[in-house]
Amino acid sequence: MSDLLSEDELKALSEGVADGTIPVDTGYNTRTKVKKHDLASEDSTLGVNLSSVEMINERFIRLFRLGLVEVLRSTPKCNPNKVEIIKYGDYLKGKTAPLAVNMIRLNPLRGHSLVVIDPDIIFQSLDVFFGGFGSTQQTGALPPTRLFTPTENRIIKLIIEVFFESLREAWAPLIELETELASSEINPQFAQIADENDLVVLCRFDVGEGEKKNAIDLVYPYSTLKPIRDLLRNRVATGDGNELSDKQWSEDLEKAVSEASVELSVVLGQLTATYKTLMTAEMGQILYFKKDELARVDVYNNPCFLAELGSVDSQIAIKIKDSLDMLGLSKKERNNG
């Protein structure tokens, strides 16, 4: 008997396969559902764990705020946005000159990263630096060829110095970084840290609030963080490194706060005068006021202590005698109340 199928059998088999009456094993698992995946997404199983980068950003922004207090003597509102992975070309599309574009090196990480500062942040910081309230803001678009003045460049340098120090401390529990400013531009198109189709990790920090909210961007090439992706993933996943633990963060934050400069004012007394008196005041005129037994010590215009005024080694000094609560009441006044 022949093992070959006849012509009629072959025809019947073909028809059965076509109409589904004869089951066929194709070798494919037809029960598995296919799910689309964007290779530029934040799936940590494919590459960089963005949750660990966000933890670093949280720590960085705390240190950055404290650093700006020392430099600008004000506390701007700074908050990190959600970390994104996007194509470098897409990032550049939303950026127009002039900007403070700084190409930086983060040794031992490879390649260059980018720190981009919105010009309004520079103008507002400059206003605060010289005693203003940071209300200066550009009302119209700046000419794309407009260069920053020497004074504005000085402010940019101060911000970058604080940025570098905060970034080094934020990364310190994972890796010791050496920061270096490679070059500065006003046009982001000239900052070629990656090809247009290459992925970058965008860390955006909002500075200010409402209509005055602007941004500082930290852009890592994906290829810069990819070699340390296991380090980033393991330190966050295990939680045993303690470098990113709440305890370590608290200790570092306490250290940074303790080293921050604080401005104190000693108020000897106060007086009430009429508007006419002020308008007619002239050199040599004497205004009388009642001097309290103890002087009030203010920290950034907030009453904090009562102190006795005196001198030590020919230097005028104060001796703290009591503390004041949030209502400006001393311990004695609180007890009597």
Image: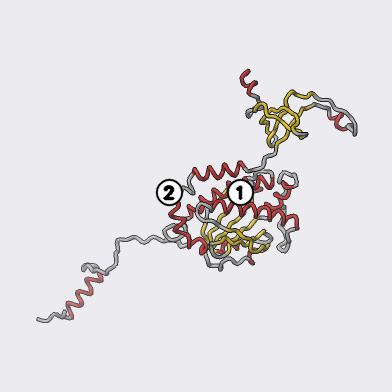
Does residue 242 lie above or below 28 as drawn? above
Q: Amino acid at mark 1?
A: Phe
Q: Is residue 17 left or right of residue 49?
A: left
Label 2: element kind: loop
Q: Residue furthest left?
A: 1
The numbered mark at residue 240 is 2
Depth order, front residue of 46/14: 46
Does residue 147 lie above or below 295 as drawn? below
Residue 194 position within the rendered picture, expressed as x and y whole percent measured from the top left: 56, 67
- Frontmost of labels 2 and 1 is 2
- Characterize the local packing of mark 2: few (<14), some (14-19) or many (20 or more) Cα atoms within 10 angstroms: few
Q: Amino acid at mark 2?
A: Asp
Does residue 45 lie above or below 286 as drawn? below
**Res. 7 in view:** yes
Depth order, front residue of 316/299: 316
Marks 2 and 1 close (CB-CB < 8 Å) = no
Q: How many marks?
A: 2
Q: Residue at x 42, y 51 (%)?
A: 237
Q: Residue at x 27, y 69 (%)?
A: 27
Residue 5 occupies which quadrant of the picture? bottom left
Residue 204 position within the rendered picture, expressed as x and y whole percent measured from the top left: 58, 54
Query: Where the N terminus falls, by quadrant?
Result: bottom left
Q: Residue furthest top?
A: 336
Q: Is residue 267 left or right of residue 116?
A: right
The numbered mark at residue 64 is 1
Residue 22 position within the rendered picture, expressed as x and y whole percent measured from the top left: 21, 68
Label 1: element kind: helix
Residue 335 occupies which quadrant of the picture? top right
Q: Residue at x 29, y 67 (%)?
A: 28
Depth order, front residue of 14/219: 219
